[in-house]
C-alpha cells in the first residue's frame, strides 16, 4: 500500500449574523474555518483528517494548507500509509529523521512547533483513518478498544449575561439531556466580579445536579484567576479552563495550588512535550488536547498516557470540524484517562454539515460508533462550495 496523493483544502464557511458569537474575547466570529486533509492510496482508499492553527472558530488557513500541500504531503507521498509512527517522526524531524529513527529520540527541525504540528495533525489523523478503513475496523479498536459504547458529553457555549445565562444553559440541557454545561468567563466580562456574578447566576438556575465548567480562554492574570477561584468556591465547578495564558505554565500551576477548583488546559498546546511540562509543574487536573492542533491521533495517545501516569484526566478540545471531533472521540474512548466529550452548541457547520453521519447526544451520552476508520463520509459538494482556492 502506497500514498498516491495528499491534498489540503481550506474550508471557509460564513456563519449567519444571527448565529454569530457576539460576546467573545475573540471578537465577532463570522465564519468557521479549518483545513480538510485528504489522503488517497494507490489502491483507492481515502482517509481524512483536520488541521487548524487557531483554537477559535475563525482563522486564515492559507499557511497550514500550503505547508501540507507543498512540503509535508510531498515528503510522504509514495510511502506506506500504515507506517504511521515512522511517518510522524519523518515529518517532525525533517532532514534529521534518520537520526531520530536510528537513535530512538527526537532530532526535531527548528520549526517543530506552531503550524508544523498543526499540519502534522491533519495528516496523521488521515493516516489512522486509512488504517482503520483498510482493516474494516474503527480507530478506537486499533487503539486497544473502547471502554464503553457511549461516553458522557457536555454542552459547550455560554456567552449570555447574568440575567440570561441560566436560560441559555438550561436550553442546552433541553437539546440533548446534557448533565454538564460550559460557559465562558474572563476578559469578555470586563472585571472578575462580573464573571463571578454570571457564574453564580448560572449555578442558581441549574441547581446542584448539573455539572458546570468555566472557560476563561487564558485571559486572566494570575491574580485575577486566583480571585475568581476564591469567589466561586461555593459553586462546585467541574473545572476552570485555561485560567491564564498557555505561555505562563508556572502561573497556571500557582493558580492550581491556590484553589480546590480543578484546572483544565491544553487546547493551545502543540505536542506531548508541552503536556509533559503541564504535568511536571502540577499545572492542570484535566488535559484538553485539540486533535487538529496537538499532533493528531498519534500524539494524542501519548498525551493520554502522560495524563494517566500522573493520575490526571483527558477531555479533548472538540470545538472542531467532524474529522478532529471524531479523532478526539476515538482517543478519549480508548484512553484510561478519557472521561467526557465536548459538544459545541454554537453554529458549527463543519461538525453537522461536512459529513453525512450525525453526532447525536441522547440523555447526555454520545455513541462511540463502530464504523470503520473515523466513521465519516465527507460531503464533496460541501467541500467544493466552501473551498478557498
Image: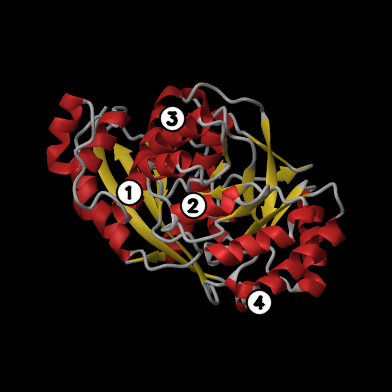
What distance separates the C-alpha of mark 1 from that of mark 4? 34 Å
What distance separates the C-alpha of mark 4 from that of mark 3? 39 Å
What distance separates the C-alpha of mark 3 from that of mark 1? 24 Å
Could you say which disc has been placed on residue 117 in the image? Answer: 1
Find residue 165 and report its horizontal and vertical position in percent: 77, 67
Q: Earlier in the sequence, mark 4 or mark 3?
A: 4
The residue that appears at 63% across and 36% down in the rendered structure is 339
Closer to viewer: mark 4 or mark 3 = 4
Could you say which disc has been placed on residue 133 in the image? Answer: 3
Q: Label 1 neighbourhood size at 10 Å, few (<14), some (14-19), many (20+)?
A: many
The reply to whether residue 321 is visible in this rendering is no
Q: Earlier in the sequence, mark 1 or mark 4?
A: 4
Relative height, residue 220 to residue 361 (above, below) = below
Q: Label 2 neighbourhood size at 10 Å, few (<14), some (14-19), many (20+)?
A: many
Tag 3 near tag 1, CB within 8 Å: no
Could you say which disc has been placed on residue 18 in the image? Answer: 4
Dot 1: what SS? Answer: helix
Q: Earlier in the sequence, mark 2 or mark 4?
A: 4
Closer to viewer: mark 1 or mark 4 = 1
Could you say which disc has been placed on residue 267 in the image? Answer: 2
What distance separates the C-alpha of mark 3 from that of mark 2? 28 Å
The residue that appears at 39% across and 45% down in the rendered structure is 274
Quadrant of the drawing holding the N terminus: top left
Amino acid at each position: 500500500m502506497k500514498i498516491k496523493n495528499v491534498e489540503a483544502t481550506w474550508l471557509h464557511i460564513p456563519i449567519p449574523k444571527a448565529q454569530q458569537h457576539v460576546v467573545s474575547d475573540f471578537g465577532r466570529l463570522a465564519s468557521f474555518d479549518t483545513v480538510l486533509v485528504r489522503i488517497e492510496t494507490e489502491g483507492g482508499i481515502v482517509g481524512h483528517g483536520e488541521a487548524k492553527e487557531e483554537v477559535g472558530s475563525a482563522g486564515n488557513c492559507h499557511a497550514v494548507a500550503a505547508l501540507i500541500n507543498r512540503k509535508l504531503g510531498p515528503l510522504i507521498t509514495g510511502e506506506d500509509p500504515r507506517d504511521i509512527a515512522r511517518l510522524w517522526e519523518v515529518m517532525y524531524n525533517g532532514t534529521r529523521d534518520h537520526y531520530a529513527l536510528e537513535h530512538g529520540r527526537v532530532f526535531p527541525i527548528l520549526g517543530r512547533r506552531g503550524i508544523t504540528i498543526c499540519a502534522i495533525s491533519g495528516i496523521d489523523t488521515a493516516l489512522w483513518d486509512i488504517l482503520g478503513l483498510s482493516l474494516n475496523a474503527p480507530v478506537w479498536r486499533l487503539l486497544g478498544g473502547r471502554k464503553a459504547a457511549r461516553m458522557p458529553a457536555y454542552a459547550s457555549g455560554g456567552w449570555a449575561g447574568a440575567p440570561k445565562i441560566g436560560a441559555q444553559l438550561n436550553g442546552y440541557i433541553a437539546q440533548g439531556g446534557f448533565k454538564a454545561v460550559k460557559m465562558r468567563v474572563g476578559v469578555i466580562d470586563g472585571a472578575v466580579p462580573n464573571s463571578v456574578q454570571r457564574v453564580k447566576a448560572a449555578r442558581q438556575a441549574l441547581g446542584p445536579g448539573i455539572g458546570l465548567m468555566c472557560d476563561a480562554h487564558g485571559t486572566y492574570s494570575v491574580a485575577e484567576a486566583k480571585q475568581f477561584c476564591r469567589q466561586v468556591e461555593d459553586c462546585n465547578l467541574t473545572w476552570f479552563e485555561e485560567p491564564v495564558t498557555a505561555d505562563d505554565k508556572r502561573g497556571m500551576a500557582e493558580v492550581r495550588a491556590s484553589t480546590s477548583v480543578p484546572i483544565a488546559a491544553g487546547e493551545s498546546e502543540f505536542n506531548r512535550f508541552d503536556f509533559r511540562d503541564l504535568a511536571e509543574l502540577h499545572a492542570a487536573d484535566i488535559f484538553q488536547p485539540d486533535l487538529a492542533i496537538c499532533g493528531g491521533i498519534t500524539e494524542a495517545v501519548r498525551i493520554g498516557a502522560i495524563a494517566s501516569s500522573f493520575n490526571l484526566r483527558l477531555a479533548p478540545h472538540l470545538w472542531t470540524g467532524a474529522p478532529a471531533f471524531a479523532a478526539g472521540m476515538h482517543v478519549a474512548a480508548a484512553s484510561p484517562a478519557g472521561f467526557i466529550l465536548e459538544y459545541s452548541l454554537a453554529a458549527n457547520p463543519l461538525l453537522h454539515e461536512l459529513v453525512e453521519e450525525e453526532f447525536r447526544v441522547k440523555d447526555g451520552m454520545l455513541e462511540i460508533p463502530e464504523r470503520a476508520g473515523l466513521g465519516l463520509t465527507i460531503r464533496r459538494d460541501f467541500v467544493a462550495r466552501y473551498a478557498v482556492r
